[in-house]
Every structure is written in C-alpha cells, then in structure tokens.
C-alpha cells in the first residue's frame, strides 16, 4: 500500500509563509505526478499545484507567483512553498500521488493538513 504523510500546516498571519511536505512510502514502482489539492469549508476540492515525473508544474491561477511546488525524488517527497498567504488560502490541504504499484496505476491521498490564514 502507498502512504502519504503530510506535515507543515498551521496558523499564519496574512502575508506570511508556510511550507508543506508530503512523504510517500510503500511499494511504489514509479510516480506519474504528485501534487496538492485543497478544500475550504463549503467548497469543492481543487487542485492547487502538481508536478509530473518529468518536472513539469501546473498551478491554479489564484496561487501563481505565490506558491512553488517542488520534489525530491530520492526522498519520495513533494513540497509546497506558500508565500504571501491570504485568508482565502485557508483550507485543508491534501497531498495526492498518481503512482504505479504492483496493483496497477492509481490515485493516493494523504490525510490532509489544515492551513489557516488569519490575523
């Protein structure tokens, strides 16, 4: 089985920064992509950013120029550096992996980490 363990969430003031980390473990043959989604109360889960195995990145428009996704393949870890945080960034952030295991290709999710931006 694949496990995704997130860390780095918390409470931050507007304009502040946080760095989320997501470490993957398990019998993974390869990753196709890893990324971050978020879900705010009363809203649908949305893609924030993802990065493919080839290093291509994709961001939702609302975070472009403020958030940066990166990965460390050796550590099977993906990061999300969040700068200039706004109250509207408040949400539960979920790590996602599109990965190939002995069971085939599938989507995997972390348990979520709360990010609250408030003064």
Image: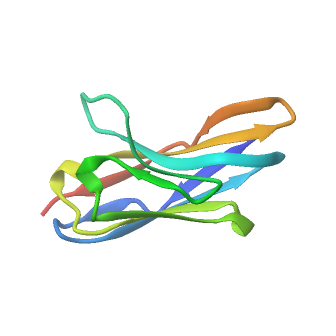
Q: Quadrant of the C terminus?
A: bottom left
Q: Is residue 74 above or below residue 4?
A: below
Q: Is residue 68 above or below residue 24?
A: below
Instruction: Please tell me which residue is depicted at 18% across the width and 70% down the height of the picture.
Output: 15
Q: Percent from the top left, x then y, of residue 43?
A: 26, 29
Instruction: Please tell me which residue is depicted at 28% across the width and 38% down the height of the picture.
Output: 40
Locate residue 104 relative to residue 71 in the image: left or right: right
> Residue at the right extreme?
102
* Quadrant assignment, res 82: bottom left
Q: Percent from the top left, x then y, of residue 59?
A: 37, 51
* Quadrant assignment, res 23: bottom right
Locate residue 119 relative to residue 3 in the image: left or right: left
Labels in figure, total: 0
The colouring scheme, among rainbow, by chain, secondary structure or one colour, is rainbow
**Residue 1 in view (yes/no):** no
Q: Quadrant of the N terminus?
A: top right
Q: Percent from the top left, x then y, of residue 63?
A: 28, 55
Instruction: Please tell me which residue is depicted at 35% across the width and 61% down the height of the picture.
Output: 10
Q: Percent from the top left, x then y, of residue 13?
A: 19, 67
**Residue 39 in view (yes/no):** yes
Q: Nearer the viewer, residue 119 or 86?
A: 86
């Amino acid at each position: 089985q694949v496990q995704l363990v997130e860390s780095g969430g918390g409470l931050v003031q507007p304009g502040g920064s946080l760095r989320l980390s997501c470490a993957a473990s398990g019998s993974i043959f390869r990753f196709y992509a890893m990324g971050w989604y978020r879900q705010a109360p009363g809203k649908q889960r949305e893609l924030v950013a993802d990065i493919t195995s080839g290093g291509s990145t994709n961001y939702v428009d609302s975070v472009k120029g403020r958030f940066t996704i990166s990965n460390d393949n050796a550590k099977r870890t993906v990061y999300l550096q969040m700068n200039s945080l706004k109250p509207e960034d408040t949400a539960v952030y979920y790590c996602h992996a599109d990965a190939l295991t002995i069971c085939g290709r599938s989507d995997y999710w972390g348990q979520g980490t709360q990010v609250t931006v408030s003064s």
